[in-house]
Image: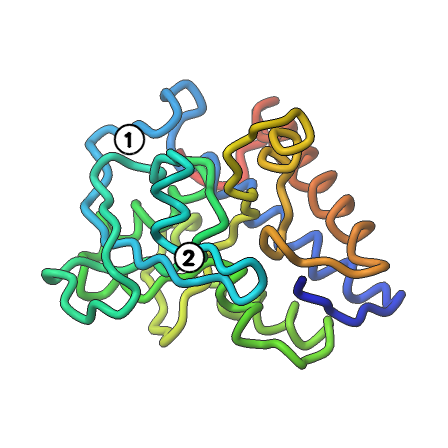
Amino acid sequence: MTTLATTPDPALGTVVERMARREAAAHFLVPADQPPGVIRPPAPPMAVRIMSCPDCGADAVTFRAAGVALPFAEWRIVAADDVDTGGLPTLTVLGCEWFAPRAMLPVAIAIERFGPVSATGFRSRAVTVTELRGLPFDAVLATLDEQESWADAVCAGSSLPPRPARTVPAASRLVSPAATWADYRASVAARFLGPHASDAGLGRWNELYLENRRDAAVRTLDGYASCPA
């Protein structure tokens, strides 16, 4: 499992809260009454590159076998080593994680708004965390926060800033065949740093994240919209 050393530094809580509010804002980039997985107009095509997870070994085969759907029908899976995506923008994820469609709204809208050439090179938090193994927790959070800031521009309706790596501000869930109740419960539990991130103190950060995400969503639904619909 991905182990990150945490400290009680209150500044970390501020970053976790900001990341949670960013995800909540992205969920409301389209009106809340639209069905899950549906964008009007349809989501633009995208190539999803599924990488093998270094923790559990799950890959594209595992993902397909679990019967998990991609967030949007217009997106398709490509091989992890396939450099030719047919000109489509790319999103890289691990084979053991899945996302709610609303979590991917900033990606779909960025492509629609700025085109597949400008809006590409997206990846999940778990992929980024995997690349940052060995760094302390505060450094990992700082990197994620910086790489996710492109979504703030999308929510604000401004131009997309140039960035070599665009991490998607979204918690993920564990891909599981859900053969038992415990498996099902694990598959629907959101983890803000990826499906395997674990640490003696990381659970409280995840709880803080989910609490702030929930509160931000409630305020938005009450009419205090955090970004334009």
Q: Tag 2, which secondary structure?
A: strand
Residue linked to disc 2: 93
Q: Amino acid at mark 1?
A: Ile
- Above/below status of 112 relative to 69: below
- Above/below status of 32 relative to 229: above
- Above/below status of 87 relative to 212: below
19 left or right of 208 in image: left
Q: Residue at x 20, y 31 (%)?
A: 41
Q: Tag 1, which secondary structure?
A: loop
Q: Are marks 1 and 2 in contact (CB under 8 Å)?
A: no
Residue 26 in the image: state x and y as whole percent.
47, 43
**Residue 109: which numbered mark, if any?**
none
Q: Residue at x 46, y 41 (%)?
A: 99
102 left or right of 187 in image: left
Q: Amino acid at mark 2?
A: Val
Question: Badge 2: few (under 14), some or many (20 or more) residues near its Cα, within 10 Å?
Answer: many
Asked which quadrant contains residue 136, the reply is bottom right
Q: Residue furthest left?
A: 86
Q: Residue furthest front?
A: 179
Q: Residue furthest right?
A: 8
49 left or right of 36 in image: left
Question: Badge 1: few (under 14), some or many (20 or more) residues near its Cα, within 10 Å?
Answer: some
Q: Which badge, 1 or 2, comes first in the chain's sequence?
A: 1
Q: Residue at x 41, y 18 (%)?
A: 33
Q: Residue at x 24, y 28 (%)?
A: 40
Residue 186 in the image: state x and y as whole percent.
65, 37
Residue linked to disc 1: 39
